[in-house]
Image: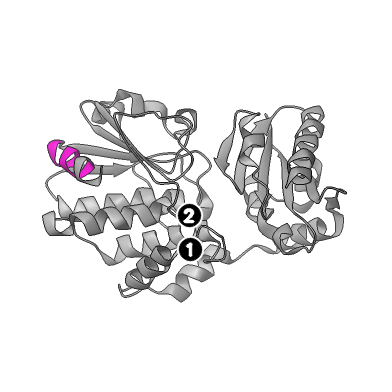
């Protein structure tokens, strides 16, 4: 499949790379890392990274602003996006051909070409593997691409702590750090938090609830977010906080936005992406997400997490 993707890339003069809405470092890292590799390898081609920018990820890369007509006859590549409805920038539909590169369970096999590797720690890892498979055919790595891919791998492995981290992950990360970028600067930008967010984290640690099943929950209503002057996207950075609490098997954060309630699910063992799929979401077995539209639905989500934990 990597060979087919490279052959398809070589056939197009315009290539536009997308990723999922509400991006994380792996979404930006894989999307923008691929763009940097392709721009260096094919300077004669037009290659863009598009989507709604997330200010918290400006340190990684700023995205391209392009008019609709550029999509005509373009090759579209979508990174790190399990479901078609989560692709950021719906203009991907204007392209001529669509490639999906992802590491989530392939519940929605969209696209003309699909490369899905659920064993990969991150799509950034997959993009580096793509480079390795094509470097003897003209693909070139740059310091900036290496920085982006390394950030994506670090982000999606929780600094190499998550079970998705493999020998291959460490091998690729070890090769990427030989390129010229500052890991210290990168880590500082990835993990620094504003005082408001840190204070919200204190609130979370004082107010989370644990159920007899081993499931835990945290409700962050708009009132609470306003009290700490924290945006929902910033609050989402704290979902991993409860992973250090002894006795918790799985946990959920309910983060209220203007038009919906984000459901952020995490687990130390019980498979929770099935719960997310019941609410039109999805993700990995131990990290998933969905959306609900009333607090009554939150009670149903908690009951389902209880059941999953009790069966584990």
- Decide if residue 252 is on the left or right side of residue 46: right
- Decide if residue 192 is on the left or right side of residue 183: right
Q: Earlier in the sequence, mark 2 or mark 1?
A: 2
Q: In the displayed structure, would residue 215 be above or below residue 86?
A: below
Q: Circles 2 and 1: CB distance less than 8 Å?
A: yes
Q: Is residue 59 visible?
A: no
- Give the number of the disc on residue 154: 1
- Decide if residue 235 is on the left or right side of residue 134: right
| Residue 284: image location, x then y, percent | 55, 45
Inspect the magenta stretch and tell me whether residue 8 lies in it.
Answer: yes
Report crowding for label 1: few under 14, some 14 to 19, many 20 or more residues within 10 A (C-alpha): many
Quarter holding the N terminus is top left
Which residue is at 34% across, 24% downward?
Answer: 93
| Residue 85: image location, x then y, percent | 48, 28
| Residue 267: image location, x then y, percent | 67, 51
Which residue is at 50% across, 69% downward?
Answer: 187
Look at the image and give the residue range highlighted in magenta: 5-11
| Foreground label between 2 and 1 | 1
Which residue is at 48% across, 42% downward?
Answer: 104
Q: Quadrant of residue 76?
A: top left
C-alpha gap between disc 2 and disc 1: 8 Å
């Amino acid at each position: 499949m990597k060979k087919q993707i490279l052959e398809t890339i070589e056939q197009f003069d315009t290539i536009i790379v997308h990723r999922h809405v509400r991006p994380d470092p792996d979404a930006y890292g894989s999307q923008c890392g691929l763009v940097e590799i392709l721009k260096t390898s094919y300077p004669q081609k037009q290659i863009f990274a598009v989507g709604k920018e997330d200010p918290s990820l400006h340190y990684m890369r700023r995205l391209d602003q392009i008019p609709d007509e550029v999509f005509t006859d373009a090759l579209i590549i979508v990174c790190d996006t399990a479901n078609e409805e989560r692709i950021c920038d719906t203009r991907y539909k204007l392209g001529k051909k669509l490639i999906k590169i992802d590491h989530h369970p392939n519940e929605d096999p969209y696209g003309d070409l699909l490369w899905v590797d659920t064993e990969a720690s991150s799509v950034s890892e997959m993009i580096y593997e793509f480079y390795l498979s094509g470097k003897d055919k003209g693909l070139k790595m740059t310091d900036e691409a290496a920085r982006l891919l390394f950030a994506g791998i670090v982000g999606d492995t929780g600094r190499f702590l998550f079970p998705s981290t493999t020998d291959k992950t460490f091998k690729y990360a070890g090769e990427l750090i030989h390129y010229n970028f500052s890991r210290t600067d990168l880590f500082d930008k990835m993990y620094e938090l504003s005082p408001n967010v840190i204070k919200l984290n204190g609130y979370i640690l004082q107010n989370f609830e644990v159920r007899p099943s081993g499931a835990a929950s945290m409700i962050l209503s708009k009132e609470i977010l306003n009290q700490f002057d924290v945006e929902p996207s910033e609050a989402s950075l704290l979902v991993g906080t409860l992973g250090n609490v002894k006795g918790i098997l799985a946990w959920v954060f309910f983060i209220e936005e203007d038009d919906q309630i984000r459901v952020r699910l995490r687990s130390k063992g019980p498979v929770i992406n099935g719960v997310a799929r019941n609410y039109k979401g999805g993700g990995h077995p131990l990290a998933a997400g969905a959306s609900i539209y009333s607090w009554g639905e939150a009670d149903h989500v908690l009951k389902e997490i209880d059941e999953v934990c009790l069966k584990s």
